[in-house]
Image: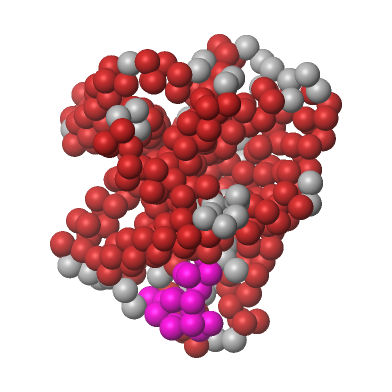
């Protein structure tokens, strides 16, 4: 790979990573503002316009931003593996150390800051890539599909083995959590935060971790097949393909009930189909549409400028991800303004834009003096 092309690819990946961070922030702020177990109860109190906005935000970002972030993780893994292909053992030791440090970041994040961490899950699933990356593409493709569909498969077969509930329940009421986050001391906050994380463990194991590993594999295969190189050659063709993916996803979302009626499934039989369609048709297809669109539009100089600007935040992805937690705590918890349980969806969307705009500005300024973000630099100091 030529040096110039490597730098160009880095800009494209960072732009996509920056947009993924914006989407993650948009979703996470809704969870920073209300307990995950009580999202429906809390946001259900708002009017129709607010609920429609909430549905739109989840339709655009929910599951898709995380897919894009995980896809780029797998893409990065491929680049690292290729860089060290002549020294496999060295690469494995280096990569495992990186995952160990990333897990340390995740555990610290969970214990002392916020239960909605993704770093620990990424570190654990990232280690599994070492077992799979030398396997043939057809096997990895099939494995990715099975992993994506693992929640639907589980629900479809739960009658045949001990049931592990996926739902999230708390021993605290909504009003109690709001009071603790607004006014409680750190010991109470720590206890509720840890309890919320543990209450999500089944959902994490059966839903989020398999989907993350599947997206890792998709990103790895995309890089292995030189998907970005193909897009550079014919960007217009892939813009059309991206629009096709996105349009198909929207149409399937709009008319999914008709599909369910045609299948003549009801109740318990319908649930696995709903889950499978949600993941494959909406999350995966829509996310791939986003990826193709971002990479394609960046091939046109006039269109690439906003993406390059967002890419400054993507270059400091670890730092900005953790700083989003800090911002959330300062805004919503007793550590700062104590606004937990007080914002409407519209206000949270405006806040998303404001925080991310500030992150882009700070990242651009910081990277004018340093090659990487502070947390990225700390991460590498351990290695």
x then y, percent, for residue 247: 22, 29
Name the side, left or right, on which 92 lies relative to 52: right
Q: Quadrant of the N terminus?
A: top right
Name the side, left or right, on which 73 lies relative to 24: right
x then y, percent, for residue 305: 33, 42
The answer to whether 128 is drawn above or below residue 55 in the figure is above
Q: Residue at x 70, y 56 (%)?
A: 378
x then y, percent, for residue 326: 53, 69
State the colouring used for the structure image. Answer: secondary structure
The answer to whether 131 is drawn above or below residue 175 in the figure is above
Q: Residue at x 32, y 45 (%)?
A: 306
Disc count in the image?
0
Residue nearer the viewer, 75 or 282: 75
The answer to whether 89 is drawn above or below residue 162 in the figure is above
Residue nearer the viewer, 303 or 156: 303
Residue nearer the viewer, 210 or 297: 297
Q: Quadrant of the rendered structure where residue 122 is?
A: top right
Name the side, left or right, on which 272 lies relative to 345: right
Would you say residue 150 sits in the magenta stretch?
no
Q: Residue at x 27, y 57 (%)?
A: 54
Residue nearer the viewer, 138 or 236: 236
Q: Residue at x 16, y 62 (%)?
A: 48
x then y, percent, for residue 271: 37, 37
Would you say residue 336 sits in the magenta stretch?
yes
Residue 25 in sight: no
Which stretch did the figure color magenta? 325-341
Residue 258 in sight: yes
């Amino acid at each position: 790979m030529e040096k110039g092309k490597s730098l160009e690819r880095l800009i494209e990946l960072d732009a996509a990573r920056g947009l993924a961070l914006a989407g993650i922030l948009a979703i996470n702020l809704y969870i920073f503002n209300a307990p995950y177990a009580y999202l429906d109860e809390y946001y259900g109190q708002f009017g129709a316009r607010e609920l429609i906005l909430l549905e739109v935000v989840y339709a655009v970002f929910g599951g898709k931003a995380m897919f894009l972030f995980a896809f780029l993780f797998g893409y990065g893994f491929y680049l690292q593996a290729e860089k060290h292909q002549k020294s496999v053992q060295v690469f494995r030791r280096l990569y495992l150390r990186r995952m160990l440090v990333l897990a340390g970041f995740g555990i610290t994040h969970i214990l002392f800051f916020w239960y909605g961490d993704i770093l620990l899950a990424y570190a654990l699933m990232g280690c599994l890539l070492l077992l799979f990356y030398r396997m043939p593409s057809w096997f990895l493709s099939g494995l990715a599909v099975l992993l994506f569909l693992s929640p639907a498969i589980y629900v479809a077969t739960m009658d045949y083995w001990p049931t592990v509930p996926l739902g999230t329940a708390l021993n605290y009421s909504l009003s109690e959590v709001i009071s603790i986050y607004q006014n409680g001391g750190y010991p109470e906050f720590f206890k509720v935060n840890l309890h919320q994380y543990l209450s999500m463990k089944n959902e994490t194991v059966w839903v989020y971790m398999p989907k993350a590993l599947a997206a890792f594999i998709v990103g790895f295969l995309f890089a292995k097949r030189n998907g970005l190189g193909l897009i550079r050659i014919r960007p217009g063709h892939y813009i059309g393909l991206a629009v096709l993916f996105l349009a198909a996803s929207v149409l399937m979302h709009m008319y999914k009930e008709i599909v369910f009626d045609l299948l003549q499934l009801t109740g318990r039989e319908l649930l696995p189909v709903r889950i499978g369609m949600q993941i494959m048709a909406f999350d995966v297809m829509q996310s791939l549409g986003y990826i193709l669109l971002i990479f394609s539009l960046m091939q046109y100089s006039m269109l690439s400028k906003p993406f390059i600007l967002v890419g400054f935040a993507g270059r400091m992805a670890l730092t900005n991800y953790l700083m989003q937690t800090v911002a959330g705590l300062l805004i919503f918890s007793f550590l700062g303004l104590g606004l937990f349980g007080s914002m409407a969806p519209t206000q949270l969307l405006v806040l998303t834009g404001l925080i991310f705009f500030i992150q882009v500005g700070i990242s651009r300024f910081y990277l004018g003096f340093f090659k990487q973000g502070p947390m990225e630099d700390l991460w590498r100091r351990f290695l």
